[in-house]
Image (spheres, helix red, strand yellow):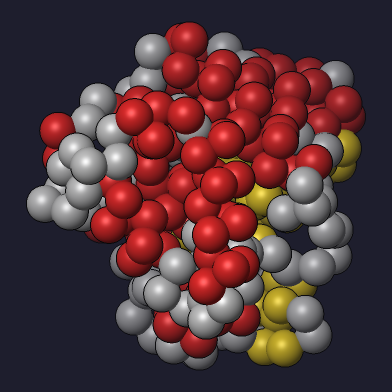
Amino acid sequence: MQGTVTVILGSNGAGKSTLLSTIMGVLDGQPQRGTVTFRGQRIDGMATEKIVRAGISYVPEGRRVFPELTVSENLKVGAYTVRDRQSTLRTLERVHDYFPVLTERQDQHAGTLSGGEQQMLAIGRALMNEPELLLLDEPSLGLAPLLVHQVFDIISQIRDEGVTVLLVEQNARMALKVADDGVVLENGEVMVSGTAAELVDNDEVEELYMGAASTASTEEAASATSDTGVGDDVDLES
């Protein structure tokens, strides 16, 4: 649904990061089973650049900013698919409103930023594409508690401005506070789905993901290569 946050929960190796990578076409090969559609168009098997141009942006785990480029240059890279200069300037202003520190650091090399500042830059760069759908993989990982709250506040603002967010997050309790709905994955299969309130009230979700398990790190990329199947058909508008 447009302008909503959907959180994906699950244990390490459940397929959460694999799902986002499959949507973006950054894994080798197509899904073993199922399809991925966006705005009525199948995108599984499509080149990643075309997926970006279709209106999907991705912030992978680990931020992956360009360390030798300045903050300003990183943001410009994010806007490479946008041809309307005035639109790009408006988006840049909005990104600076979200993350004032990026204005202060605009001439600083991204590699010298703190972890929290790099996460803000990574999200800002993704927004420069003016996406309809934003994929976020573990945005709070490694951040201090205060910065975690700031990042989730920004996610709420992004949603309120009409961008749909698909969020993989190990901090289940915080994620469900901002999410509209969510799913629990195990071995690439949806085990539980519902509204955020329903997941909060689910005893199994509470036991498995709101306690110690919710602070575990996500699966490593090596595990993602073991199964590129999405299982069921995935419609990114439903």
Q: Residue furthest left?
A: 68
Question: Is 117 on the left or on the right of 107, as rendered?
Answer: right
For the point 72% across and 88% down, the residue is 41
Q: Position of residue 56 (x, y in %)?
A: 58, 68
- Nearer the observer, 87 or 218: 87
Q: Is residue 152 above or below residue 182?
A: above
Q: Position of residue 177 (x, y in %)?
A: 74, 22
**From where the camera sits, is residue 219 visible?**
no
Question: Is 64 on the left or on the right of 89, as rendered?
Answer: left
Q: Residue furthest front?
A: 86
Q: Quadrant of residue 233?
A: bottom right
Q: Is residue 150 above or below residue 146?
A: below
**From where the camera sits, is residue 212 visible?**
yes
For the point 60% across and 45% down, the residue is 94
Q: Position of residue 70 (x, y in %)?
A: 21, 48
Q: Which quadrant does the C terminus fall into?
A: bottom right
- Nearer the observer, 174 or 16: 174
Q: Quadrant of residue 2?
A: bottom right
Q: Which quadrant does the N terminus fall into?
A: bottom right
- Nearer the observer, 212 or 155: 155
Q: Please state the total of marks drawn on the protein image.
A: 0
For the point 63% across and 20% down, the residue is 174
Q: Quadrant of residue 49?
A: bottom left
